[in-house]
Amino acid sequence: MKKFHLIPILLAGIFIYLVSWLFRFGFASAAPQDCDPLGWFPEDFGLKDHTVFQYDGYYYIASIYLPQENKFAYARSQDLCHWEDLEPILTERTSGDWDESGIWAPYVIEDKGVFYMYYTGVNHTVAQSIMLATSTNPADPTAWQEEGMIFQPSHPKVIWSSTAWSDCRDPHVIFANGVYYLYYTGLDETGGIIGVASAPTAIGPWTDLGTVITPVPGHIFESPNIFFWQGVYYLIYNETVPGIGVAASSRISTSPTGLWEQADPLSPGWAHEFWLDAEDNWRTSYLTTYDITIAWVNWNPYLNPPRPLIGDAAYYFFLPIAVYEKK
């Protein structure tokens, strides 16, 4: 049995804590001191699943707008602290469309000057589909153009119907090895899944490849976020246990479709987005209530490849188990 010496671990934790604070407030382009934590905290409405992207010197956030969930809140900032609340986007709902009742969980990528916003469309029976909007000028909220439905799950044993609640939400898209991959929350006969589809272009056509991780009976996997760093793919997602709450986890793989190693807990928050800021530093944005908090990403030095840690890394030396939080 391996022996763990507590004092060296505690000293290492304190060291990482101090370094993270020096990095945040000394060596990096630090946030304004009047904003702690960083993030967007509107007073008149709530935020939920969201996306962060950059354009022309600004960071942009698009988010589910609460409580209506039928449009996206939209804002921009140059410092991740002070946010200019822009007009909501994609506000029109049309009877009979796949997004007639609501829109959820936007995610934006940029490709050759075009910004692609993938999002969940919800019809009158709460059947969910993946929709697309595009823009070449995200600074103008009215410039987003709806492109319609681009994906519904079709792999063997999938459970999906246009006439009943059906899971196909929380899209996330990456480009890897010449292929576009679209990840989503779904359901098939094996249970709640994180599914993936592939395509030769950012708009499709999409081939549904099915689940990327093994389902757990009674658990719901949501809000997948995938990024590539130092030769490794990182999968961040929520695992919801009905009646208990939601916990975030991270997994790693050498392939965008897995096999994924055992999950590690990630805290605080849920519905995480991981992204590089203007100085190529890793950040994460996430929910703990219905606001968006933004924090530094640190890396666990005791694991190889390292796993992500949110905010002050020393916190994790005292958090050996997953923390479930009520949504």
Image (tube, rainbow, N blue to C red):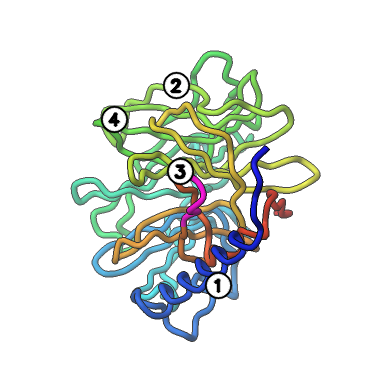
Q: Secondary structure at mark 1?
A: loop
Q: Which mark is residue 168?
A: none
How far apart, in angstroms, are the residues tagged by discs 3 and 1? Answer: 36 Å
Instruction: Name which quarter of the figure residue 173 lies in.
Output: top left
Viewer can see residue 83: no
Q: Residue at x 48, y 41 (%)?
A: 235
The x and y percentages for residue 188 are 61, 22
Q: Residues within 10 Å of mark 3 (few under 14, many from 20)?
A: few
Q: Determine which residue is flagged by label 1.
A: 41
Name the N-terminal-most of marks 3 and 4: 4
Q: Is residue 147 above or below residue 141?
A: above
Name the N-terminal-most of marks 4 and 1: 1
Viewer can see residue 54: yes
Magenta stretch, residue numbers:
299-304
Q: Nearer the viewer, residue 171 or 9?
A: 9
How far apart, in angstroms, are the residues tagged by discs 2 and 4? Answer: 13 Å
Q: Determine which residue is flagged by label 4.
A: 179
Q: Residues within 10 Å of mark 4 (few under 14, many from 20)?
A: few
Q: Are marks 4 and 1 in contact (CB under 8 Å)?
A: no
